[in-house]
Amino acid sequence: MREPRLGHIHFINCLPLTYAFATGGYGQGLTIVRDVPARLNSMVTAGELDVSPVSSIVYAQQPDKLRILPDVSISAEGALQSILLVAKRPISALDGQAVALTAKSATSHRMLKIILAKAYHIAPRYFISPLTLAEGVLQQAEAVLFIGDDALEAFHHRHPDYWYYDLGDEWRKLTGQGMVYALWVVNADFAAKRPAALQQIYRTVTGGFAYGLAHLRLAARMMASRTPFTAEQIYEYINLLNYGFTERHRQALLTYYGLAYDLGLIARIPELRFAEVIL
């Protein structure tokens, strides 16, 4: 029988689990596939992965095919540095203007559209772009949405002529709640046919996060040696995030889905159905 296939986000936001895979012995007996969220989204919905973190909007698009892995998410209560709108003009002046959306994510696209429609009552012209910071990103648009490590780099190297908006902070102002950016989801067929393997993955993911967070200073130093960020910047960033899924997270996720539904960004507000594991 083949090894279970587990997706893993190739960004600093998954550092605790990355560190657990690298140093804690977690992930043994699993095939781990590392990629950006957009690619993991498509792989798990196509059945190429058994379990994976996905942009949280993906569950709302495929609720019949997926189950949510309990107790784990990537969330934040407010500003988080890694979902950033960089603009040539104030955000309120972007109505009708070209806004480039990162090709690496899905949740952030809907999140930005909700914020601009509901908080600022504007409708820019959106397009998806593979641009990175090194490629003159604001030559084709009045604003660009970055996520992940690209956003962190923009956050720490601000241009004096641009405006910077942290979407976590904007979301908090709009809703009064935090935001669930990513969920770990399970292919429903895999959950039904291989419950023991699912239990193994659940323990790997939840235990791995606990291990990585317990060794966060060491993990930050490891990551600093591979990235343009200092260990202190990485440590500060990870402490803006949380990795659980409680009733507060459930309510925040349903708020997001409700606003997305209001704008026609998803077809329905899904029931949250969780994979059956031993907690």
Image (cartoon, rainbow, N blue to C red):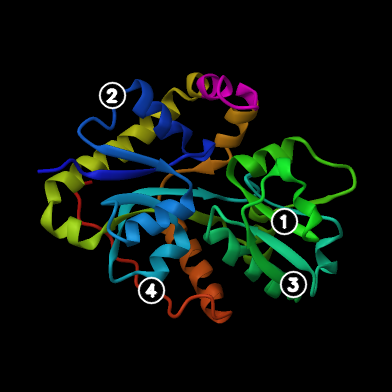
| Cα–Cα span, label 4 and label 3 | 28 Å
Q: Which residue is mark 4?
A: 270
Nearer the observer: mark 3 or 2; the answer is: 3
What amino acid does circle 1 point to? Val
**Mark 4 or mark 3, which has the lower sequence index?**
3
Which region is colored magenta?
220-232
Q: Would you say residue 213 sits in the magenta stretch?
A: no
**Mark 4 or mark 1, which has the lower sequence index?**
1
**Mark 3 or mark 2, which has the lower sequence index?**
2
Residue 275 as seen in the image, left or right of residue 169 = left
For the point 50% across and 62% down, the residue is 252
Nearer the observer: mark 2 or 1; the answer is: 1
Which label is found at residue 124? 3
Query: SS at mark 2?
Result: loop
For the point 21% across and 44% down, the residue is 4
Dot 4 alpha-carbon crowd within 10 angstroms: few under 14, some 14 to 19, many 20 or more:
some
What amino acid does circle 4 point to? Pro
**Mark 4 or mark 2, which has the lower sequence index?**
2
Q: Which residue is mark 1?
A: 144
Query: SS at mark 1?
Result: strand
For the point 79% across and 53% down, the residue is 138
**Mark 2 or mark 1, which has the lower sequence index?**
2
Whether residue 190 is visible: yes
Q: In which image quadrant can residue 153 be found?
A: top right
